[in-house]
Image (cartoon, grey):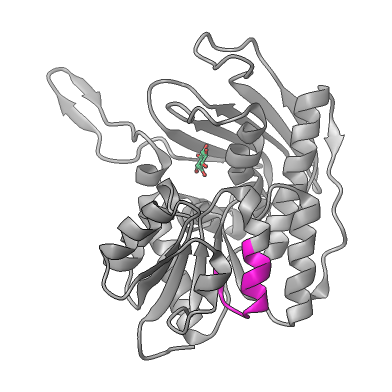
Amino acid sequence: MPSQRALGVAVVGTGKMGTDHVRRLQHVVSGARVTAVVDIEAERAKTLADAMDGCTAYTEPAAAMAAQDVDAVLIASPGPAHEAALLEAIGYDLPVLCEKPLTPDAASALRVLEAEQKLGHRRIQVGFMRRYDAEYINLKRLLDKAELGRALMLHHRHRNLAMPPSFTEEMLINDSVVHEMDVTRWLLDQEITAVTVYKPAPSAHAPAGMNDPQFVLLETESRALVDVEIFGHCGYGYQVHAEAVCERGTVRIGDEHGPRVSADGRWGGRITPDYVERFEDAYDRQVQAWVDATRRGEVIGPSVWDGYAAAAVCEAGVMSQREGRRVEVELIEQPAFYQ
Ligand code: ISE
């Protein structure tokens, strides 16, 4: 592991997030540089690589991982491609930052969990970046201090301007609500035990065949109740709110992201259009923390266990979405390796 020279990172997947991470690694964070980009679309990878000194384009993750100048891997390909890339990175014993979801279902997440345990040391951090957002960090600190007593309920709102055409109803759970599933486990420091998905009458702007918005109810080990409004096509911007209801008070985050301007007899502000802008600081902090830890030879942040637990909750959520009933979450016992 290089502690003096910059960490050579291979970025796997050059879509919206992968391209943003390439920019971040090259121009925002310190101590790293992009030495490889990987995409099944060879031309896309080549165009990106050609714009950077000392960067090579590949179409196969394993080919990049075998390269001498690759010290670590950032996986930002679509979820279904993660398992193969993660198992290859474990084979090369390389440190990984893997965008969420770890994998699309619990069985594949378990295979990664087993492979990392067999390797004998942690190598993988999962990109649940909300854990690096300043407002979520403050909320977590307040809940940990318990000055307002125990958290009894959480209310989450998660609204997107619109989703890409390839976005399916299941992805409302697997791709979007997965964030609330992770922050709920992290904020309350306990597992989610059951999921019920409710579907109100769909918006006239919902794509054909998709019930949008949806309302998801999570139950936890301590019997906290957690609701999530997920709205994929709200049409006016990107908003993420959370409110914790505690025994002696409530805490709310996400209402204002940016300045509130008063002028011309009105007050107001701007709503960010998407998560890349809303969570820009969180992504920056997450990637910097990963680079720093990797150069120190450490692994920090959300683990494969967190990725597996979220995948298991998603699986219950998708079943509830399909069958219209409450579904209990099935989790294996947490291995000592991840405690
Ligand atoms: C997207 O993939 C993300 O990860 C965003 O954070 C989330 O808000 C959005 O709903 C997802 O589609």
Magenta-span inclusion, residue 92: yes
Q: Quadrant of the C terminus?
A: bottom right
Q: Foreground: 176 or 19?
A: 19
| 133 w.r.t. 204: above or below | below
Residue shown at the point (43%, 72%) measured from the top left = 9
Count of marks, rendered view: 0
| 323 w.r.t. 289: above or below | above
Where in the figure is residue 141, as x and y percent of width and height?
53, 58
Query: Which residue of the protein is positioned furthest toward the left in this rendering?
Result: 264
Q: Is residue 189 left or right of residue 180?
A: right
Q: Which residues are magenta?
A: 85-96
Magenta-span inclusion, residue 313: no
Where in the figure is residue 25, as x and y percent of width and height?
35, 66
| 15 w.r.t. 25: above or below | above
Q: Foreground: 284 or 64?
A: 64
Where in the figure is residue 149, as x and y percent of width and height?
65, 49
Q: Is residue 190 visible?
A: no
Residue shown at the point (66%, 74%) measured from the top left = 90
Q: Is residue 103 left or right of residue 295?
A: right
Residue 47 occupies quadrant: bottom left
Where in the figure is residue 266, as x and y percent of width and height?
20, 19
Q: Is residue 150 left or right of residue 250?
A: right
Residue shown at the point (23%, 24%) measured from the top left = 267
Query: Which residue of the protein is positioned furthest toward the bottom in this rendering?
Result: 4
Q: Is residue 88 left or right of residue 53?
A: right
Q: Is residue 259 visible?
A: yes
Query: Which residue of the protein is positioned furthest toward the front in this rendering?
Result: 43
Q: Foreground: 239 or 18?
A: 18
Residue shown at the point (12%, 19%) measured from the top left = 264
